[in-house]
Amino acid sequence: MSFKNPTDRWGPVSQVLHWTIAALIVAVAVIGLWMDTLPRSPRTIEIYALHKSIGLTILVLATLRLAWRFYAGAPATLAGLPRWQVRIASLTHAALYAVMFAMPLSGWLLNAAAGYPLQWFGLFNVPRVIERSEALHEFAEGVHDIGFWVLLVLVVAHAAAAFHHHLFREDDTLRRMLPGRRISRTGESA
Ligand code: HEM
Ligand code: HEM
């Protein structure tokens, strides 16, 4: 049995990475927005640390995912989809990959430039790669702030498109990313 992506659907490794990263992104974003509203306290610092650890995990998983994507390829495009839709979907996927990296990297940078320590779930210290810098801190903070809203718009559009295909066009777009579901294999979209 191959774990690579067959031509008609996403394989198990791609699916696990897709849905794990999606869940972690929702968690890290909710924690990020929430922690911003909390008063300074030791508990708040722990919540910031949790945000950073989950964010770093996303960075590692996104790297694995990109490598797997190059190695395992992608299923064939569903037949019957207009070219412009396929093009927009590819651009959206590329942009999602870009923010999947830009968000944790800018978070890491803003944290390091502010001189804050960084640990992964309290297990080990992540090395500081740069010196303290107010200018760099502000730049990375700007990228982190704007990047989040870009991410939000992309994810909402991306998920809405997936549900639109599933509910209204009744094609296999969403089923191909879900485990154990039978797909029509006709390749035809409604
Ligand atoms: C996909 C990964 C990540 C997402 C979606 C994310 C999202 C967010 C959000 C929504 C906020 C609050 C609003 C804002 O300032 O934009 C925030 C703040 C913050 N994040 Fe992240 N984050 C991610 C990864 C990381 C990582 C890896 C680190 C550090 C290693 C980090 C460090 C911070 C810090 C220090 C703040 C507070 C910034 C401030 O007070 O201005 N984030 N993040
Ligand atoms: C409810 C939320 C989500 C749904 C319903 C969803 C659904 C899907 C579906 C059905 C596909 C396959 C599209 C195709 O075969 O052309 C897909 C692919 C993809 N999704 Fe999502 N997704 C969600 C959240 C996310 C999130 C949060 C991210 C990352 C930030 C993401 C990034 C991607 C990427 C990059 C692809 C392209 C596949 C690849 O090249 O790895 N998705 N998604």
Image (cartoon, rainbow, N blue to C red):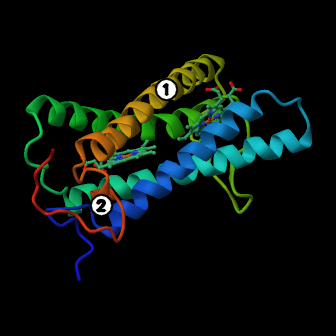
Circle 1 sits on which residue? 147
Q: State whether residue 60 appears in this view.
A: no
Q: Is mark 1 within 8 Å of ligand 1?
A: yes
**Foreground pick, 98 / 190:** 190
Q: Give the labeled residue for mark 2.
A: 68
Q: Are marks 1 and 2 in contact (CB under 8 Å)?
A: no
Q: Foreground residue, 51 or 126?
A: 51
- The residue positioned 49% from the left and 57% from the top of the image is 20
- The reply to whether residue 99 is in sight is yes
- Amino acid type of the residue that numbered disc 1 sits on in the rendered structure: Gly
Q: Is residue 126 left or right of residue 176?
A: right
Residue at 45% x, 56% y is 19
- What is the secondary structure assignment of the residue under circle 1? helix
- Residue 135: image location, x then y, percent: 60, 16
Q: Residues within 10 Å of mark 1 (few under 14, many from 20)?
A: some
Q: Is residue 23 above or below residue 34?
A: below
Residue type beneath disc 2: Trp
All told, the count of numbered labels is 2
Q: Residue 25, how many percent across, how many down?
A: 54, 44
Mark positioned earlier in the residue sequence (1 or 2): 2
Q: Residue at x 26, y 61 (%)?
A: 10
